[in-house]
Amino acid sequence: MKKGGRSTVKELLLELAEAVQHAVAELVEDPAEVVGRGADGAPSTRIDRVAEAAVLRVLEYEEARLNVLSEEAGFIDRGGDATLVLDPIDGTHNALRGVPAYSVSMAVGRSHLADIEEGLVRDLVSGATYYAAKGQGARLNGRPIRVHAYNPKDLLFTVYLGSNAHPDAARVAGLARRVRNLGAASLDLCLVARGAADLYYMHSAVANTKLRAVDIAAGTLIVREAGGFVLDLGGRDLDLPLEPKARTDLVAVGDRRAWEAIQ
């Protein structure tokens, strides 16, 4: 999405993902050093800022007509008609602790999750790239992906657990044959999209640990284009304004019977 129409959105998203992966790989200073505050007032680490700066440099170089909504900088008005919804490092704590599950998540839309047109999640450890365009399906490294067929005897859930989780999360986890959690919402959503997990359950008891649009914009589209559903805790299709302060819990499922199984 350059000024002259010289690049597709997909090509731009891939270029941005490559820039972030390179910037993170080349980082020699302490990635955990707190270098400021993000848009929500939470501490920003060096790895977050380095990744965000890489994206902003490419957007400037390519003269991309996109505003930016980022976890770190908040909303940046660049005179665009659409907005790049960006989490430069999803799973920062994993990256800093050495847990190999963190990503860059990017989506392009206008005002709400429901109008996201394209999304890309790059696993910054494996290099796996998930991409979806509305109405065109979802892909992993260029190959089509679909959610898993429902099997009540072999349910695999990814569930947010820990001291900030709502007590109901433990009940939901107990309904599955197996439980996992990556600690990076974009990657947990992509597990549902690729059929590795039947359900992703995020229910936080603490307001400031609920999910933001930057965490889930790309992953939500990828799940839906892979044939799954992303719902609020009432079972309705999830929507969320593309705003820095908007937060939500969610359930992502490959089959609505997985939603029914946890009721």
Image (spheres, grey):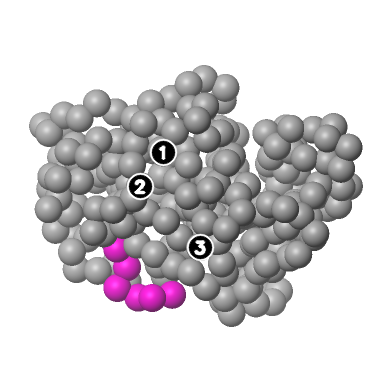
Q: Where, by quadrant of the figure, is residue 142 drawn?
A: top right
Disc 2 crowd rating (10 Å Cα; few below 14, some 14-19, many 20+) is: many
Percent x, y of residue 62: 86, 43
Question: Rounded to the nearest whole Å, what is the CA distance between mark 3 and mark 2?
Answer: 15 Å
Above or below: residue 222 compared with residue 200: above
* Disc 2 residue type (three-letter): Val
Residue 126 can be seen in this image: no
Q: Mark 3 points at which residue?
A: 241
Task: Assess whether residue 204 is covered by the magenta stretch.
Answer: yes
Residue 207 can be seen in this image: yes
* Disc 1 residue type (three-letter): Val
Of residues 243 and 53, which is closer to you in this image? 243
Answer left or right for 136 relative to 28. Answer: left
Q: Where, by quadrant of the figure, is residue 249 drawn?
A: bottom left
Q: What stretch is highlighted in magenta?
A: 202-208
* Disc 3 residue type (three-letter): Pro
Per the image, label 1 sits on a secondary structure element best described as helix
Q: From the viewer's perspective, is the residue at label 3 or at label 2 nearer?
A: 3
Answer left or right for 247 relative to 196. Answer: right
Residue 223 tag number = 1
Dots 2 and 1: beta carbons under 8 Å?
yes
Q: Which residue is farthest bottom?
A: 41
Answer left or right for 69 relative to 165. Answer: right
> If you read the primary sequence from the N terminus, does the residue marked by circle 2 or circle 1 appear first?
1
Residue 230 tag number = 2
